[in-house]
Image (spheres, rainbow, N blue to C red):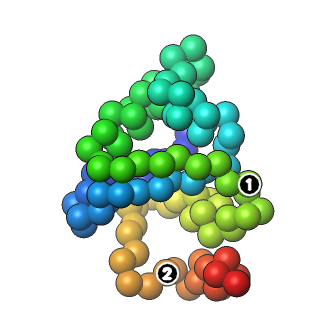
């Protein structure tokens, strides 16, 4: 598993304390909500996630089917092939914005 994780410390830096993380991997979301998956090959990543999110006031991890969250899927694919950290505070990237409009409807 070689996926990039948007580190919660960046979210904390902008003052966000109550967060909901959505993911399309039911197995991973269930492992996080159980509090770990030490037996799984990705168990160390789950443990790291749990450490990072302990700084938030409120954290929710929700499973969302991929077709129901096209924006997150597109952002994950964009991050996978990007070589530089990027954060968008005001506007979405031009290739993501149309998907966000569809999600709102």
Which percent across, then down, holds residue 27? 67, 34
What is the quadrant of residue 85 in the picture? bottom left
Q: Whole-Å distance between the Cαs marked 1 and 2? A: 22 Å
Which percent across, then down, holds residue 36? 49, 24
Q: Earlier in the sequence, mark 1 or mark 2?
A: 1
Q: Could you tell me if residue 5 is visible in this image?
A: yes
- Image quarter of the C terminus: bottom right
- Image quarter of the N terminus: top right
Which percent across, then down, holds residue 31? 57, 30
**Badge 2 density bin: few <14, some 14–19, many ≥20, Cα 10 Å:** few
Q: Residue at x 33, y 34 (%)?
A: 51
- SS of the residue under disc 2: loop
Relative to 47, does residue 103 appear above or below in the rendering? Answer: below
* Marker disc for residue 65: 1
Q: Residue at x 23, y 64 (%)?
A: 15
* Marker disc for residue 92: 2
Q: Residue at x 39, y 34 (%)?
A: 50
- SS of the residue under disc 1: loop
Which percent across, then down, holds residue 81? 56, 58
Count the marks: how many?
2
């Amino acid at each position: 598993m070689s996926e990039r994780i948007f580190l919660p410390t960046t979210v904390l830096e902008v003052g966000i304390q109550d967060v909901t993380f959505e993911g399309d991997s039911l197995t991973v979301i269930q492992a996080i909500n159980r509090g770990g998956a030490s037996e799984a090959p990705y168990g160390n990543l789950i443990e790291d996630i749990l450490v990072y999110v302990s700084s938030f006031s409120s954290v929710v991890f929700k499973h969302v089917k991929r077709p129901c969250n096209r924006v997150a899927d597109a952002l994950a694919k964009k991050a996978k092939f990007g070589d530089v950290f990027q954060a968008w505070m005001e506007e979405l990237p031009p290739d993501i914005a149309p998907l966000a409009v569809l999600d709102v409807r």
